[in-house]
Amino acid sequence: EKQGYEHFMLKEIFEQPKVLRDTVRGRISDDNSSVLLKDISLGREEIKKIKKLFITACGTAYHAGVVGKYVIEKLVRLPVEVDIASEYRYRDPIIDPDSLVIVISQSGETADTLAALREAHRKGARVIAVTNVVDSSIAREADDVIYTWAGPEIAVASTKAYTTQLIAMYLLALYFAEIRGTLQGSEINEILTSLRQVPGQVQEMLNDTAQIQDFAGQYARHENAFFIGRGLDYTVATEGALKLKEISYIHAEAYAAGELKHGTLALIVENMPVVALATQPALLEKMISNIKEVHARGASIIGVALEGIAEMEEVSEKVIYIPRTHPVLTSVLTVVPLQLLAYYMAVARGCDVDKPRNLAKAVTVE
Ligand code: M6R
C-alpha cells in the first residue's frame, strides 16, 4: 500500500499537506479568531492557574516538544521545561499540582514516555497526551488527549507525525495564550490565519523536489554533516540531523550556530556539508555572521531561508527557499526539505530507508 511511492517514508512525507489539514480541522474558528480545543477538559480557570509546564517525550517527539517549549514560552509567557523521557523521572523533577505535564508520543506506547506520565501522576500533576494512536496506553492513562490525525506511520523514521505534533503545539499555545490573555486578539488572528495556510505551503514545497534530489546526490558520499541554526531554527536543525543519521547513517550534528566557535568549529573542514537554517528575521544578521565563520573554513553551505532573503545567496552554495509565514510557524515548513534531503541521501547510499538498522518503530523497553 505504498501507492506508487518507492518507500513508506516518501509516501508519508507527501501525505503531510493532508494530515496537517486533518489535524487543524475543527480546531480553529471559521473567522480565525480562536482555537477550539474541545479535546481537552481542562477548564479555563485551571489553565489560568498553571505555574509551570513540562513537556517530555523521546526522539522526534522530543524534538517537537522543544519547539513546543519555544512557542509556549514565547506566546504564553509560561515557563516550560522539556525533558527526554528516559531522563525525566531520574532527575526527580519538581512537579506539583500547579504543574501541567504534556507527553508527546506518535505510537502512544513508548515505555519511557509512559513511565514519565505515571511519574507526573504520582506527583499530582495533570497530564495532556499528544498522540497519534487512539486508545493507545498513553492515550488511556492521560487526563486529556490531543490527537494528531497523521494516520498510520509505517516508516521507522517519523515525518508526518512530527509535523502534526508541531501543529498540536501551536494550537495548544494559542489556546492558552487566549485564555491567559498573553496575546492580543489581532495577533492570535494573524497567527491562525497563517497557520491555515501552512498545509498548502507544504504542498508547494513538495511540488518541486528536483533541487533537493540534486543536492542529495552531490553530498551523499560524505560521512559527516552539520545542521546549524538559531532560535526556532536550531530546534528544527536537531530533527534534521536525527533524520539524516537514522536513515542514511551519515554522522550529523545539530549545533546552535552561535555555539560553534566554542569548540566545534575545529571540526569544520574543506567541503564539509553544513545545512544552515535562517528563517528567523530577528536572528538573521547574527546567523549570517555564523555562516560566514564556517564558510571561511571551506564548508559547503546549503542554506534554508525564507523567500526573499537575498543575503543568504552570498554565503551559501545553494539556497532552498521556504514560503513566507509568521516567524513562529516556520518549523513546519523548514523541516520538509530536511526530511527530503535525508530521504534522498539514504536512497543514494542504498540504505534500507523504511527499516534502518538496529531500530524499531515503537520502543517498548526502557
Ligand atoms: O512513538 P513515539 O513518538 O513515542 O516514538 C518516539 C521515538 O522513538 C521516535 O520519534 C523515533 O525517534 C523516530 N524513529 C525518529 O524518526
Image (cartoon, helix red, strand yellow):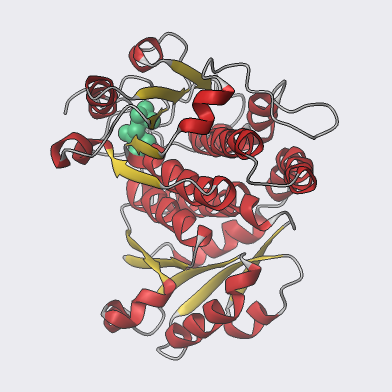
Quick check: 291 above or below 228?
A: below
For the question of whether residue 344 can be seen, the reply is: yes
Image coordinates for residue 55, horizontal then vertical, percent: 38, 38
Quarter of the displayed picture in which ligand 1 can be seen: top left
- Residue extending furthest toward the bottom: 296
Answer with the quarter of the image where residue 170 lies.
top right
Q: Residue furthest right?
A: 31
- Where is residue 181? Give x, y as percent: 65, 41
Give percent across and percent down for residue 193.
Answer: 79, 42
Along the line of sight, the residue nearer the viewer: 333 or 157? 333
Give the residue at x 20% y 41%.
Answer: 87
- Total marks placed: 0
Examine the image and state in which quarter residue 282 appears.
bottom right
Instruction: Choose top left, top right, bottom left or bottom right for residue 38.
Output: top right
Q: Camera-side residue: 22 or 189?
A: 189
Image: 92 above or below 310: above
In the rendered image, the quadrant that contains the N terminus is top right
Quarter of the picture containing the C terminus is top left
> Which residue: 50% across, 24% down?
46
> Residue 169: image x %, image y %?
54, 37
Nearer to us in this view, 61 or 92: 92
Residue positioned most to the left:
90
Q: Residue at x 24, y 39 (%)?
A: 94
Instruction: Judge left or right: residue 79 versus residue 250.
Output: right
Residue 149 is at least partly visible in this image = no
Vertical side of 10 occupied by 204: above or below? below
Residue 99 to residue 228: above or below: above
